[in-house]
Image (cartoon, helix red, strand yellow):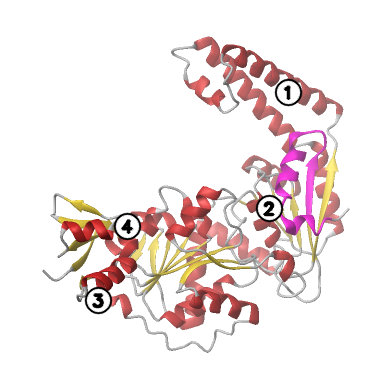
Amino acid sequence: MTPSIQFHEGTLRVTGLDRDALTQLRSVIPIEWDTRDHCGRCDAMHLGPLQSWIRDHIHADVVQELAADVTSLQIESKSRLKPRRDQLTAIDAFENAGRRGLIVMPTGTGKTVVALQLIARANRSTLVVVPVRDLMYQWHAKILEAFGIDAGLIGDGVHRVSPLSVTTYDSAAIHMPRIGHRFGMIVFDEVHHLAGPWRSDAARMSAAMIRLGLTATLPGDPDRAKVLQTLVGPVIHQQEIESAAGKTLAEYTVRRIAVRMDASEQSDYRSYGRAIQKFVRDAKDTDPSFSWEDTYKWVASAREHPERAAAASTALKAFRAKRKIEEQTRRKFRVLEDLFRLHAGQPVLVFTGSNVMARQVSLRFLVPCLLSHCAKRERQDLLSGFAEGRYPVLVANRVLDEGVDLPAVKVAIVIGGMSSTRQATQRLGRVLRRSGDSTATLYEVVTEDSNEVQRSRDRRRTSAYRSRRGH
């Protein structure tokens, strides 16, 4: 029989190979014998190696039952794309690496331009995968501007599949069993989102052989980084923020401002801390292997161990109250007021660590607050109003950490957040888009003598922060 490859619900069905051939092939790709359909079966992502192995070892043509429009994308208008030298370096690196791999470039250096140029060069039907709906529409607008193509949209209640389409990670994972064979190229924007068990299915079920991952920050976890290299390819180009500062990005400084809790806050903070420490000591007496993460399990065991669950619940309440004092220290609001006055007339971004704090800042200073659950029309109004200067300040929790294009903002204030260096780098990148000769400033406002100081230190482990610390 002539070897045949058929796409089937995110997998490839391979017929025309005997068991011995499949055994040999298994040393190249993970393929198994499917007793139901009497064929070999593997994830769709292995199409390229599968084709090469059959050609090299079986010396036979391969019948492929894939979608006819995989090579149908024709981009005529490419003149609007004018990559800079650093962008061309990234483009060439991808081409020289066999058109598979990860490109790491700081926010504001034009990763989208790099991707659009590579899409134009590939001339293959392409699916762009992004983390959120706002970014999906942003990509749609940029494709229209660059190529004059009304790209397909898959997500947010729309299902319009075209040779050049944009979707979200969640929608891709849902629909890839039906559309995974229709694209010869796939682009994962903010590719660090791909490493999770659910979203990674979007890559496994795609037959696209040209694979591009874009991010400003790779995962710090080696296991997650390895997943990205398996699904997309190795890191083939990496640019650091400090190397772009003053060139393609604005010059910048990072300033840390420490504030003290007042007497009542400090007293409550220490009281909550002692309660948590006592709970942990007692828990370790009961179970020497206890760790703080086990507290949530103890709370859930109310039926079997009601007293233990009650103690764990009390400890969690103390923990949350302690974090609330750290984040919402009253003197932070005084510092915010001083910074707003210092930078009056300039657009200012404020990043918080929770939706509650974002709302408090919004109400205290009568400035708009953008959260993840804001409706599409409200989000568009806030972003356009901020860009036009109608809103001098915009407060957000995590929704602006990555992806969404913002105007040339030169002042950002961080008053809370996770210890993630990725989040720190993404937030720094929000103020680094170059405009004129102005210098960008990122303020970190932290509460002294609290765990927030350590989280701030963890965030600042990146070389970009270390090399630009202010006073």
Q: Label 2 to label 3, Cα distance in Å?
A: 44 Å
Q: Could you tell which of marks 4 and 1 lies nearer the N-terminus?
A: 4
Q: Which dot marks residue 424?
A: 2
For numbered disc 2, what is the local secondary structure? helix
Q: Could you tell which of marks 2 and 3 lies nearer the N-terminus?
A: 3
Spot occupied by residue 7 in the image (x, y as percentages of width and height): 24, 63
Asked whether residue 139 is in view, the answer is yes
What residue did someone put label 1 on? 273
For numbered disc 1, what is the local secondary structure? helix
Spot occupied by residue 90 in the image (x, y as percentages of width and height): 58, 75
Q: Are marks 4 and 1 in contact (CB under 8 Å)?
A: no
Q: Label 4 to label 2, Cα distance in Å?
A: 41 Å
Position of residue 416 relative to residue 367, above or below, is: above
Asked whether residue 172 is in view, the answer is no
Q: Could you tell which of marks 4 and 2 lies nearer the N-terminus?
A: 4
Q: Label 4 to label 1, Cα distance in Å?
A: 55 Å
Q: Label 3 to label 1, Cα distance in Å?
A: 64 Å
What residue did someone put label 3 on? 68
Q: Mark 3 is on which residue type?
A: Ala
Q: Residue at x 79, y 46 (%)?
A: 445
Q: Mark 2 is on which residue type?
A: Ala
Spot occupied by residue 124 in the image (x, y as percentages of width and height): 37, 78
Q: Quadrant of the N terminus?
A: bottom left
Q: Are marks 1 and 2 in contact (CB under 8 Å)?
A: no
Q: Residue at x 17, y 63 (%)?
A: 17
Q: Could you tell which of marks 4 and 3 lies nearer the N-terminus?
A: 4
Spot occupied by residue 464 in the image (x, y as percentages of width and height): 74, 59
Q: How many other residues sit within 10 Å of disc 4, few (<14), some (14-19) or many (≥20)?
A: few
Tell me which segment is drawn in magenta: 443-469
